[in-house]
Every structure is written in structure tokens, then in C-alpha cells.
Amino acid sequence: MPERGRRRGDSPADQYRRLWRVGTAPDLKQFLASHPPLAPDHLLDVIEVDRTERWHRGDRVKAERYLKDYPPIKEDTEASLVLIYGEYYLRKEMGETPSLMEFIARFPHHARRLRDQVLLHEAIEFGHEALAGGPPVIPGLVVGNLLGQGGMCSVYRAVEEKSGREVAVKVLDPRHLQNLLRVARFRREIGSLLRLTHPNIVLGFQTGESGGLPYLVMEYCPGGTLADYLAHQLVPPAVAAAILRDLAGAVEYAHHKGVIHRDLKPSNVLLSVVQPADEVSSTDHAPADAVGLHPVLSHAVFPFVAKLSDFGLAKCTLGNEGSITATRETLGTPCYMAPELTMGARDADFRTDVYGLGAIMYELLTGRPPFFATSPMEVLRMVRESPPMAPGAVNPQVPAELNAVCLRCLEKEPDERYQTAGDVIAAIGGGKG
């Protein structure tokens, strides 16, 4: 029998919310003790349920109490800020007028971020014109048409006034400014891109704020995404191998810099048009017979350079930056997710990105993701439990060697995959260099 209040597929926060609905006030510590240790984002979700329910019943548990009782939150700068600001926001929702000065006095180490967040909250609340949306105003840039929109951001085409160089400007959408975890994810992407310089990673040029909205100026890739390209045509297996080797080199480089992407998929690979100087690509160190087609010739079939983008879910393993996962959101896209991400985002390591490389390779070879179904929950079940159909069974043109490399990348257990992106490069052919 399932535990009281627990249903299959529920998040811990859903389970805890149900307990509040079916009986007397549950004990938070007892509830958490009945679960495996939760990642800070999931723990925050449960705490927010507890705090909201208690405050509406007159039990005004302060943020300090939660920070004291749950050290993983206190030790995570972003998580503790989310918890503290959550009290401010809850009090506003309850019709109070909380004082910013009170919160700064209570939490001096977070003074600047609290001030900025409260000012943004008030700007949104009163319809400040700077947050009305539309193209950002950035000194030195002429911002043009909208290129696309994602879950959190809008991307605009722009031109540098002095150089005439085309760039892309990615700006956080105003509706997300009150979601500190989403703001943190965007800032994480900015930090990741600005520290990475590799021919197969989209370059980040500069960052700043426009009307209170953070933005990132980055390399413009006119070829769109790899997902869009593969939706209309496949590449030969030899070219797929060359593309994958380039991307694996970028992943290996990022890992050496302490950055794990955690969301590798074709829609997060942008395509830059090959320039004459690019004719000798980053794959040219590989022997021609490794993929059956010389990499330079491959550009006649695939006239792009593939570049990793969207580091919003990246985990940094160097320094004290920690990991940011959006509360109540799935980390990554289900049909490309590594099995370990379906059970706890904090489990990600270098081998998680090896799985992501395998998922991209699978789509390059077959034109479809490793797993798909009619519902996200069914996809997640397949990711955890079902082996993928061999690429060679979908596309008989796939060589046995590439078929084996792809399937090993997609092993359920991280220990059974290639242990590094460099090992993937070596398996395809071309060494780790």
C-alpha cells in the first residue's frame, strides 16, 4: 500500500500538500525523514507548502527558523535567497505591507539582492514601462527582429553599431522576474557562456541589464537549431559522426572548465554557417577513415558548424556556485534526459552529458529521439526502464561501430557508459586531443 498522502508520480511537495488537506497539520521533519534526502529545489518546494499553510492558519514561522532547521538551504546562496524572499512575497499576497528595511536588517548578507528583487517586484506590480517587454535597448547595438522565444527568454537579432557585426541578444522575459530560480538559471547561463571559449560553443560577448531585465549578447548563428535541421533532412552517418565528435570536444572542454551542461539535445545545438576560414574544421585532427568521409568534404553535405548553446541548466563543479534547478519544473526535456536526472538533478556528473551526446547522436543517425510516447510520464518511464531501439534497426545505413558507440552512451547506469566525452571522441575515432 502507498504511504498516506502519496500517489505515484507525485512530487514531494504534492504529497505534503495533500497531507495538509486530509488531516491535522503534518510534521515537516517527520515527512522529510520518510523520503530520501531532497535536492534543495525540491526541499524549497516542500518548505513553501509548509510555510503557506501555517501562515494562513496563524502560525507565522519565520524564514530564520527554516534556515536553521535545514542547513542545505542556508548553505546554498540562491536557495536561501529564494526562501527569504518567499516570506516577503507571501506577506504581500496576504495583504500586508512588509518593510524592505526589516528584511535587510534581518538578512544583511542578502541586502543587495533583496533590494533589487523588491524593486523589480514593485516595478512589475505597478506596470513600470521599463518592464513592458519588447526589444531591449542596449547602448552600441541596433536591436532588430525577434528570432524566437523559449520558456524563459526571447532572442533578438541585432547589429553592433561600430563593427556592423551581427549578434543575438537573449533577454529574460519580464514575467519571470519574480521567479528567483529562473533568474538564477539565466544568470548561470550567462556565467557559463562568458567563461567558455571553444569553436563548438556559442560565444558570449557581453551582459548587462535593460530596464531591469538581464540580457546576454552572444554569437549569432543563422542556421537555426540542429533540431530544426533534422526535422527536414538527415545527414549521412559519416557526417553525423563528425558533428558528434565536434560536440563531444566542446563538452570535454566545458567539463575541464568545471561546467556540466545537463540539457544536451538537438534544440540546444545552434548552426553557424561555415566561412572560408572554417573549411579546416575542429574535426580535421581525426583520421579520414574514422568516419568514412573526410571532415572537409562533410561541409559540402552539412555546411554548418554545430555549436552548443543554452547553459541555463548547467551545473558548475568548480568554486562555490552550486546548482540551480527550477522548482516544479522538469530538468531537461524528457525524451533526451539521462535516467539519473529523472530521479534527482543533483546526481548529474560528466557521464550525464555523455548520455546527452548519445541522445544527439541517436537523432543524427535516425531522425528521432531515443524515446518518445504520447505522455511525458510514459517517456520518463521508458527513460528509466526501457532500452532504446538500436539506431541500426531504425536506419539500416548506420555502421555497426556507430551503433555500438551510440548505445553505450545511452546506457541506463552511468558506470556502464563512456566515462568522459573524450572517451566518446576516441571511440568514434580521432583521439582525445
Image (cartoon, rainbow, N blue to C red):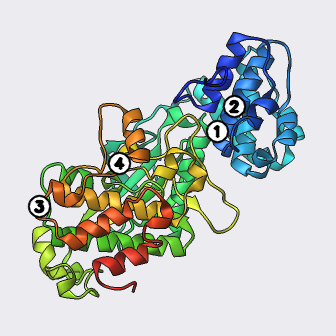
Choose mark 1 or mark 3, whichever is in front.
3
Choose mark 4 or mark 2, whichever is in front.
2
Q: Secondary structure at mark 2?
A: helix
**Foreground of the two, 247 or 276:** 247
Residue 396, which numbered label? 3
Q: Within 10 angstroms of label 4, few (less than 14), some, or many (20 or more) residues?
A: many
Residue 364 in percent (x, y) is at 22, 60
Q: Is residue 40 above or below residue 251?
A: above
For the residues marked 1 and 2, what is the alpha-carbon distance in whole angstroms?
6 Å
Return the residue at label 4. Answer: 156
Quadrant in the rendering for residue 412: bottom left
Left or right of residue 44, residue 261 in this image = left
Return the residue at label 1. Answer: 42
- As shown in the figure, which amino acid type bears the numbered disc 3? Pro
Say if mark 3 contacts mark 2, CB within 8 Å: no
Q: Secondary structure at mark 4?
A: strand
Residue 277, which numbered label? none
Q: How many marks?
A: 4
Q: Within 10 angstroms of label 2, few (less than 14), some, or many (20 or more) residues?
A: many
Choose mark 4 or mark 3, whichever is in front.
3
Say if mark 1 contacts mark 2, CB within 8 Å: yes
